[in-house]
Amino acid sequence: SISSRTMNAANKSKDCESANLEMGSGDTNPVAATIDSAAINTAKIIDPPRLNNTGMGSDDNDIAIPAAINSAANLLDPTTAVPLPSPGAVAVVPLGRSSEREGRAENVGAAPAVTADGGADNPQATPEDLIEAWVSDDHAIIDNLQVELGTTRQQLDVALSQLSAPVVTGEPLSPDDNDGKEEGKKRRVAIIGSLLLLSAIAVVVGVSVYFTQSGKDDGGPINNNADTPKAKAVPQVQMPPVLETLKERGILRCGVVPDSLGFSSINNDTKVREGFEIDICKAVAAASLGGDYRYETIGVTPVNRFRTLASGEVDLLVSATTHTFERDVHQASTGTGFSFSTPYLYGGFTFNGIPEFVECADELNAVGDCADLLICVIPGTTWMDKTKALFPGSNIVSIDEQSTSIQSLIDGVCNVIEGEQYEAPELIVRNYGYTGPYAMGKNSFSKDPLAIVTRDGDSEFADFVNWVLQGLLHAEAQNITMKTADTFTKTGIFGDRFENMFQNALATVGNYGEIYTRHLEPIAPRLKVNMINKGDTGLLYSHPFGQVDTIGPGPIKGGVIERIVQRGFLRCGITLPSNQSVPQVISGERVGLDIEFCRALSTSILKGKTDNISFESEYKNISLALENGDIDVYAGGEVHMHSDFRHPGLSFSKPYFYEDPKGNSTVGKTFSLVTKEDDAQWTDLVYWVIMATFYAEENDIIQTTPNEMPLVRLFGPDLERILRDTILTVGNYGEMFGRVFDQK
């Protein structure tokens, strides 16, 4: 959760003390290039219109969402340190899970009716059918059991499909190089045996749960309208740092989608898996292991990917996974949070298919001439959650993966399919054999910032992965290609072992633009939202919230949130202009925004108490003040690599203010809230309070309409109003900015 935002490398060597990274020529050049959410351009303080401190950037699309932004290249002032990339930006997003392009989620629709004697009317009854017969009145249990069985099936399918998957170097291993193969094969055979056992256990447990629940309810119906239950906790396995493990293992393991053209699919000629996301995996492998890198791709689905990562079977996910509030803090299937990189691609799904029904879907019409609308959707994704919120269940058909969706269109099972720009263009649909009329919808119904995912608790590896991605983006901004990779800067930020990390990554896959052109350009043109930002658009972009009604743990014992609640006030460190005290708002100064966000944090934790804040401005050593508990948060921390390594153990939130460059500088200063990185719960809350102000502005939610913000139970039921109280107290980002800089 925090490592993707902090860029805190575990290496504390003297190489880290200097953030100026030298090019081959001896000149100092920028290292950080960020996509979209990586840096928020700010308005000039002296003459604000609020040109760039806004989420109103254009993506050249007619979409049904109010804001989108384009990629950014953070150009480094040669006289300053490298700016720290932020993992997100600011724009409205759906309240759903994730928009995975591909997966093998099982169809969890209603099972055929069977008799209670085990299926006399249906001799081919499946385990799901038998469960339906036993607990036919309890649809909640049915759904849960079917999902569990579906998960097991998918895990079996993926494991079986991986039995012959090779470990890959720059080229496929020769047939006699079987060490990696045998290692993976043995591991998967063991997994398959375990999963077969789980299949049987799921049925037995399901029936037991039914009778237990029935007994508690005295034989009456189970209340399916009860509060959302707590997610089953499947905590992440505590493992050694990945970079140290890679040193011994010599192979990077990436969780990927099994089959998605342009992203992850087998080349029919070479028989090697390739694609946009595979190249990202290769870039991390080359950066971490050098020119003799080896990597292994392991297929994951929307249902099992987080468990696969949490268990340690893979080192990272690069599997079309959307960064959401829920997954950051308390992902439902694992009961823990995860770390997300800067997004590597921004997308959103559209309705596509038979033109007249696409028009129905675009207009959200399912009556009259549109009554026969049937939409194929993949379960376990943000798409399904969003579609269920827009249409009745009778208009939705669950399918297991994107290729099945297209085949279902061909077979007439549905007349509309969902897909992002890259997944359902006419070219791909025709290649599957569809010959009927086809149209793509004009509206996008989601926003999906796709990011690399790593386990919480390993900030060094999360930072490393994020910087590899930044290197690919920066190289494109500086026109450094695969052929000129050796001209890219060397770095000591992760120690001498990784000084050529950027060069190795670029020599392997090229820069971001080269990767896109190679894999995605033939499918769909590159939208502005996924281009390098040149300072001509706003970059405030809020990420999706996800299933925020999932009940997470309350304040951690001894954690910062608990201490604030017990103390009754927030300790907020700030830096004031000379000879000034803390008024309610300091007009015309950025510190006014710092104070506003302190007030937002206070009200979110202390249930609407806006002025229970002790402003502390005498501390010179922020790290020590946070470590000693003298302050809970520091507002207005300048975000760049130098500050990150000068103060190890700190986490920098989503930036909320970017100054324009001054003098000979090529990049302005960036400001955020700073916390200790060892309290992920507190760091997550701080991060998403900032996001809430962006989200509110994008959705036209203002200080007088705070109840339009969702209730959030990820921090426990007692803090469910954190977003509403934030907006009630300070309003949205635009309102805060207007108060500070005297703008309407």
Image: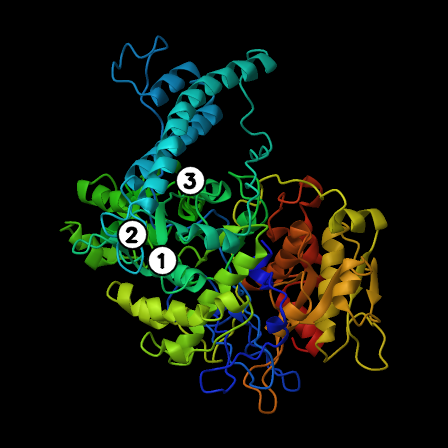
Q: Which residue is mark 1?
A: 277
Three-letter code for the amino acid on which mark 1 is drawn: Glu
Helix, strand or loop at disc 1? helix
Tag 3 or tag 2, which sits nearer the N-term? 2
Mark 2 or mark 1, whichever is nearer to me: 1
Q: Residue at x 62, y 46 (%)?
A: 712
Q: Mark 2 touching mark 1, by CB under 8 A?
A: yes
Q: Residue at x 76, y 67 (%)?
A: 622
Outermost front residue: 176
Q: CA distance from mark 1 to mark 3?
A: 19 Å
Q: 135 or 337, which is in the foreground?
A: 337
Whole-percent x and y of residue 349? 37, 55
Q: Which residue is mark 2?
A: 260
Tag 3 or tag 1, which sits nearer the N-term? 1
10 Å crowding of disc 3: few (<14), some (14-19), many (20+)? many
Helix, strand or loop at disc 3? loop
10 Å crowding of disc 2: few (<14), some (14-19), many (20+)? many
Tag 1 or tag 2, which sits nearer the N-term? 2
Q: Residue at x 37, y 76 (%)?
A: 485
Q: 314 or 453, which is in the foreground?
A: 314
Q: 249 or 339, which is in the foreground?
A: 249
10 Å crowding of disc 1: few (<14), some (14-19), many (20+)? many
